[in-house]
Image (tube, rainbow, N blue to C red):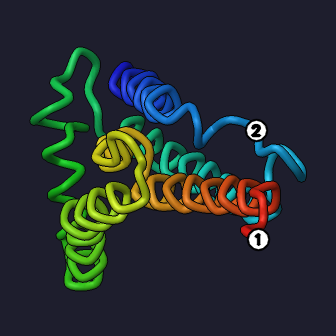
Amino acid sequence: MVSLIVHAILGVLVILWIVRANPRVFARPTDGPAFSTLEIAFYVIGVASIALGYYFNHQFVAQYAVPGGNPFWGPGSWQQFIALGYVNPAAASASQDYTIINVVLLPLFTIVDGHRRGIRRPWLFFVASLFTSCAFAYAFFFAVVERQHRHERSAAAVAPVPA
């Protein structure tokens, strides 16, 4: 259970790091509500993915871990967790897909697109996925992009029209 608590704390710290690294993005937009409906939808989906993931991770640890066990190898460990994802062809199919999405596509997309959009430290979305969930990391990134769009629309609305 300690490893789940450590994961949760590290997840919160990485999220805070992202927010602090991007104060302009997370500032309240000059017009409209504090959060758009789309931002809220992304956050709800992301938080739901964390809740579901932690529920199942808790079940795993409760079933397999031994008191005082090692969180990296042995019963109830990260190594066993990964191995169980490949116990049959159906699980292996889902696990390889998730691994490619989380370890290859998420960092590639968020780093390249984040830099293009001026998001500072976009690699932190990948780091966040290691402690939260892949779905949360994508949802959080998409919420940040939506918030940037809102800031850009607000700025364009108040910009003087050239004569």
Name the amino acid type tagged 2.
Answer: Arg
**Callout 1: SS:** loop
Q: Where is residue 108 drawn, in percent x and y?
A: 23, 65
In this rendering, position of residue 14 left or right of residue 64: right
Task: Please tell me which residue lies in front, 73 or 158.
Answer: 158
Q: Residue at x 75, y 57 (%)?
A: 159
Q: Which of marks 2 and 1 is nearer the N terminus?
A: 2
Q: How far apart are marks 2 and 1 (CA)?
A: 30 Å
- Quadrant occupied by the C terminus: bottom right
Q: Say which of 49 and 64 sits in front.
A: 49
The quadrant in which residue 148 appears is bottom right
What amino acid type should be assigned to the residue bearing mark 1?
Answer: Ala
| Circle 2 crowding by C-alpha within 10 Å: few under 14, some 14–19, many from 20 | some
Quarter of the rendering occupied by the N terminus: top left
According to the picture, the residue beneath numbered tag 1 turns out to be: 163
Residue 57 occupies quadrant: top left
* Residue sitting at x 40%, y 58%: 134
Figure label count: 2
Residue placed at 44% from the left, 23% from the top?
A: 13
Is 20 rendered above or below residue 55? above
Query: Is the residue 57 above or below the residue 37 in the image?
Result: above
Q: In this view, does 76 lie to the left or right of 28?
A: left
Q: Which mark identifies residue 28? A: 2
Of residue 57 and residue 149, the one placed in the foreground of this image is: 149
> Which residue appears at 26% of the width and 26% of the height?
66
